[in-house]
Amino acid sequence: MNSGVRFLVCLFFFALHTLGLHAQSHRHNFPELAKKFPAPEAVLNNSAQGKDFWFAIPMNDNAQAPLNAIEIYVTGSSNTIVTLEVPGQGFSRKKALRALDVVTFSTRDGSVSTAWEVTSSEVPDDIGVHVFADAPISVYVLNAKPVTSEGFLALPTSVWGTEYIHLSYYDFNEARRWATGFTVIASEDDTEISILLRGRGAANTGAKTVKGNRLGKTIKATLMKGQIFNVKGKLPPVVYLTCPELKSQPINQLDWFLM
């Protein structure tokens, strides 16, 4: 690492430390005001960095579209070994990560499989992707196809919650029909999820999911560790918006839109 980069890294961590001390001083001087804000430690530690990640790879475009690559990028500030596994598929791969470098898992070298792209709907599916390391890391996911590329920053299990409200584009017709939806991922066995379908389109008989569930219906399922549960719109001729509420043990949710 050259001296300029080393200086910027040191400056960044010094600034974080200074801000933490400054915030602590204000908490002591203004205790009533401080109660309205989270502790500095919570803000600094509640980030997208972590040691344990579970996520899914939502469908991009459609299953017949040619694939450029599905890639998972991992970076961190410490030397560590990164493990990527999909237990439901019996897959595991390890790669060494050097501090402040990036290690890539990809369909190009066989460390990622196209079979992990989500195609199921409203059934537990054993394609949850697990990435973990002994040191804090950040994980990014890219799904690239000729006419569209999608990606996201994965969140570690340490910041997962138990209640979510999904919001994405509605199903609609353009050059062809496009669907919207979301995917739930469980990191623990016997994770019970309850999904209440809400939103616009209740008066439209075509507004439903692939499995025929309509707005106002509650979908329930039990997931085992590493399983995903995908919900996809049926593509009715009249547009509608699906806004489910999800309640369960800690889970992760990915919102997606086929484009």
Image (cartoon, rainbow, N blue to C red):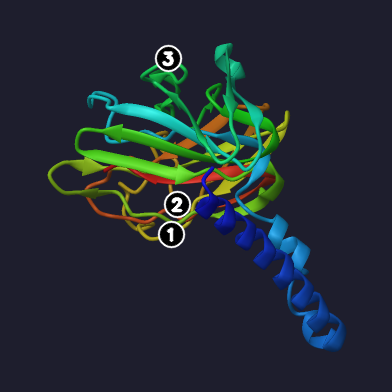
Q: Looking at the picture, tell me which residue is in the foreground, 153 or 94.
A: 94
Q: Residue furthest left?
A: 175
Measured as percent of width and height from the top left, residue 20 is found at: 75, 69
| 3D distance between C-alphas at marks 2 and 1 | 7 Å
- Mark 2: amino acid: Leu
Residue 110 got which mark? 3
Q: Give the total of numbered labels.
A: 3
Measured as percent of width and height from the top left, residue 241 is found at: 37, 56
Q: Is residue 32 left or right of residue 115?
A: right
Measured as percent of width and height from the top left, residue 236 is found at: 27, 45
**Mark positioned earlier in the residue sequence (2 or 3):** 3
Q: Looking at the picture, tell me which residue is in the foreground, 29 or 208.
A: 29
Tell whether label 1 touches label 2 (CB within 8 Å).
yes
Circle 1: element type: loop
* Residue neighbourhood size for the residue with mark 2, other residues' Cα within 10 Å, grouped as few (<14), some (14–19), many (≥20): many
The vertical placement of 205 against 131, above or below, is below
Q: Is residue 192 left or right of residue 123?
A: right
**Mark positioned earlier in the residue sequence (2 or 1):** 1
Measured as percent of width and height from the top left, residue 171 is found at: 30, 49
Tell whether label 3 touches label 1 (CB within 8 Å).
no
Q: Which residue is mark 2?
A: 215
Q: Quadrant of the C terminus?
A: top left
Q: Which residue is mark 1?
A: 199
Residue under the image location 60 percent in, 28 percent down: 130
- Mark 3: amino acid: Gly
